[in-house]
Amino acid sequence: MTVSELYDTLPYGPAPEDSKLAQAWLDDRGRKFGVYIDGAWHGVDDQFEVFSPGTGNAIATVAQAEDGLVDRAVRAARRAQPSWGALPGVERGRYLYAIARHVQKHSRLFAVLESLNNGKPIRETRDLDIPLVSRHFYYHAGVCDMLPDHEPVGVCGQIIPWNFPLLMLAWKIAPAIALGNTVVLKPAEFTPLTALLFAEICAEVGLPPGVVNIITGDGRTGQAIVEHSDIDKIAFTGSTEVGRIIRRATAGTGKKLSLELGGKSPFIIFDDADLDGAVEGLVDAIWFNQGQVCCAGSRLLVQESVADVVLNKVRRRMQTLRVGDPLDKAVDIGAIVAPVQRDRIHELVTVGVNEGAELFQAGTCPAEGWFYPPTLLTNVSPASTVAQEEIFGPVLVAMPFRTPAEAVDLANNTVYGLAASVWSENLNLAFDIASRVKAGTVWINCTNQFDASSGFGGFRESGFGREGGIEGLYEYVKPRHQDQRRPELASDPVVNSDAIDRTHKLYIGGKQVRPDSGHSLVIHGHEIARGNRKDIRNAVEAARSAQPGWQRSTAYLRSQVLYYLAENLQHADLFGASREEIAAATDAVFRIAGQVDKFEGRVHAVPSRGMAYTQNEPIGVVGAVLPDNSPLLSLVTLIAAGIGMGNAVVLIASETNPLPSVALYRVLEASDIPAGVVNIVTGLREELVPTLADHDGIDAIFAFGGEELRQDVELRSAANLKQTWVSSDIDASVDELLRRCTQVKNVWVPYGE
Amino acid sequence: MNPAELRTPNLGRNSGIPLDLDWVESVRVNRSAVERRTATLLGRRTVKKQWQAAWLLRAIACMDLTTLAGDDTATNVRRLCAKARFPVRKDLLEALGMPGHHVGAVCVYHEWVSTAVEALAGSGIPVAAVSAGFPHGQSPMRLRLAEIEESVAAGAQEIDIVITRAKVLGGDWAGLYDEVKAFREACGEAHLKAILATGELATLRNVQKASLVAMMAGADFIKTSTGKETVNATLDFGLVMARAIRDFNDRTGYRVGFKPAGGIRAAKQSLDWLILMKEELGDPWMKPDLFRLGASSLLTDIERQLEHFVTGRYSANHRHPMP
């Protein structure tokens, strides 16, 4: 068209990014790739095609790595780890720095290749993905020496998704190698290309062979990594469904595990928000990366007084979104990664409409390639499928709310807990909501903000572990000298019989209650209540109702309660416990009491005008299966750490030596611990553990005992993805104990009038 | 909902509405969110090649070619008017297929209104006069009104008034409303552009509130700056004002125009402003009846870009007739 023809309507016109260099890069490699193991490329005959979603055309083939290659990669990583881990931190840091520099030097090639292979707009890869990748390596170049009391985990198997291919690689590899681990990484089968370019960068900077190994393949390759016996840690980002499979596969193996899974994150707009700002935030929340973002603000909760205004603004804004060629610089929404994904989006939207949702779509999709238009579903309620299921596409569902309390209830009415966005010009309200929403990241008056200094990860079934920030470093280390077992304290199980008969009950909801079964067990000459599944149920019920109030109490108050517990403990006459153990238990409680008001968050130095602060929040209701050794010390240690950080606890007492536990009831009663915050059930492990470990009302489960117990508990934890801590014994510093009993929430608050 | 319902209503010239203080007080502006939008907007949109040439020609059509200097004389005002009639070299306009293209208006002090009217006779290009104690807005109200009336009598079809910043900073919205309403009445048929002097209003919230009050009082355009403040037309101010225009249009049906002015010197900036209009207000706000760019040296840079489009070579200033 001529200038004068265009003059009347002033359309945008095409603004294509030049993809010549990326095409040449592919051509130079024959559009066929092997795997990168031990610093060298290995050809693989078994290949599969990868596509460009913007056109639907195949652009290269990559290797389907089978078990033998996985093993080869793991062995290379194992060989490389000792010397890599032994390097002074500053030397490892130099490699990370060089990687960051090289990513920047090739930033446009990375950006174009990523857009080409994933279908996301070039604007996003150029302005967000790739800059965040180099930022991640820069940040971690400086962390190598930061945890002197810890050592590398060893060999890490890392499996990443297709939505942010290179960025997720950076989130995995940077902290791992910075802290002395070596890695075997598998990119997603749809989007392996930038990982392969990254492998070339590793070679370019002279990274020692075996430190980073990159192998491609489908789910089978991933499975081989997860199941490999010589891997010490698995880090996975992807669907909750696959996360559960990995949890089960690694149960009882001793592999450290971090999972970053799905979400259905609320985007909450209050009536006193900058509504235009909030609507623009929604564009970044749900129409960023075609909505294929685990933390996408996919559930719009809007205060009813402004709901119509906001929804009209949203509909109008949707009409100026441009869907099209991902390599066009003026496109907002690119292509969906694969037809199967687009079909799933379509399917879920259809379900939503069939259930009564009102559909609004805008934008025109190109005829070729795999596109889906920006979509809004209204007339939706929590009972709607589309309000609960992660759609992972450019689909927003909207629901009104009446009050701030109802906004919180709706926000938390989900199995997920990855992120939330809160919009209000009243910071009293915004901070309060931020503290009450169950999510690993809360963005106040902003959304989808990321930085290497701020840890990212979920609550609930969005997974566990953090990536980024100081908090993320702990995923890639273990305390030094972990093998030094705590000396076992002598206990005194033989107790003189009482003159007057005594009844030992269960401790549930602040009261001593008789077991539901009406049965007792005779242990060391004492009749001990034989709890059953209903007693566990009642204990969890009591803990759930007590926990929110207890969480809201101040750390000062909780530490005072613990000090009082220590006071009452010191002279207690607890049968079954030796004086020595009572003294040790008293010390443990006293020490933890002194730390719970100091285990604080921090303020991250994020690169924006504003701050990102962290809060160490309780996990919720923590269940624990106590060890048989040092039963009193173990019990009070877990009580103190658990409730000190604001959790409620449900504890299964030692089966072989429950006497100190039951004796403790009176001390607990005397120590101002609110009813339901501590619950203790005695009985047979085989009758109690399955119910506790299966219970969806339990947010974390700790189990101390033999291999069978540890595996059973981790297997069962998969159903609702409880956080787990399984070990033969409680052997942890106060710092680690408190970390085990908390999860980090990052709250972002930009400011400026 | 049918997308057509989301189109902007049009009730003709803004005749103003009674002052609605509840509306003014309900204004919320989050600065960080505004900055994020403007910072990412230009990464989201760009125009290239013939599309860019068409957009640049539109920027010329929307330009209030301005001289507001202490040393203005009839000589440079006449030269400016000649440039307004022939803003781009003839050979270039012919190559672009847009002969006879001219600017939106010429903007001068009262003293040169009649000179400009004479120089532009027959061109259809209106003369705009800055007025009401420009740029400070602190002369006696009686004189400010008289100044407007005299400029209109001298042939100005557009009057760019300045508001009293003290009324905004003091929260005297009724006072601001009365002032702008009086100016509007003094304008009669001439169109009123209300210069908010955003760089002196302290906060974006004040900018949005002042925008609303000026529109309620009957402003035909709201304009960012006099060009004399330390901070002139920024996209942040523009975004906030555009959103106010949109809300006003939604609630009243009146379309109020927008004019950024001050510090707009590069062709790229004129595209940025047009992009902001297209995205936030829609295509009607990309035409001279609802959009003006206050500028002086901008034109030469646009000419150079157009020559580059036509010849493929980068151009130089001296190849284009100076204003």
Image (cartoon, grey):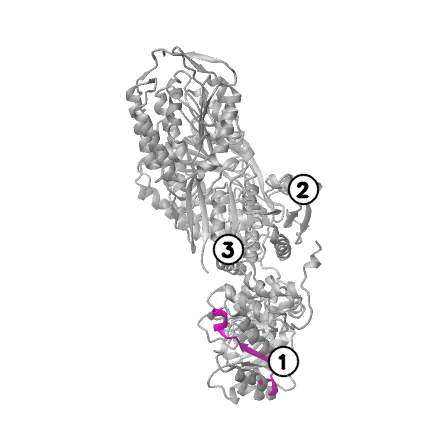
Q: Position of residue A37 (x, y in %)?
A: 44, 36
Q: Residues within 10 Å of mark 2 (few under 14, many from 20)?
A: many
Q: Position of residue A742 (x, y in %)?
A: 42, 36
Left or right: residue A747 compared with residue A373: left
Mark 3 belongs to chain: A
The residue lying at 71 percent from left, 55 percent from top is B2
Q: Is residue A50 above or below residue B161?
A: above
Question: Label 1 amino acid?
Answer: Ala
Question: Label 3 amino acid?
Answer: Glu
Closer to the observer: label 1 or label 3? 3
- Frontmost residue, A546 versus A69: A546
- Frontmost residue, A146 versus A581: A581
Quadrant of res A593: top left
Q: Position of residue A492 (x, y in %)?
A: 32, 15
Secondary element under disc 2, as helix, strand or loop, is: helix
Residue that label 3 marks: A425
Left or right: residue A447 compared with residue A3: left
> Distance from label 1 to label 3 (Cα)?
40 Å
Residue that label 1 marks: B190
Have a look at marks 2 and 3 and say if they share a chain. Answer: yes
Mark 1 belongs to chain: B
Mark 2 belongs to chain: A
The residue stretch that appears in magenta:
B151-170
Residue that label 2 marks: A352
Mark 2–mark 3 CB contact (< 8 Å): no
> Distance from label 2 to label 3 (Cα)?
33 Å
Q: Position of residue B40 (x, y in %)?
A: 52, 58
* Dot 2 or dot 3, earlier in sequence: 2
Quadrant of res A276: bottom right
Secondary element under disc 3, as helix, strand or loop, is: loop
Can residue A473 be seen here? The reply is: yes
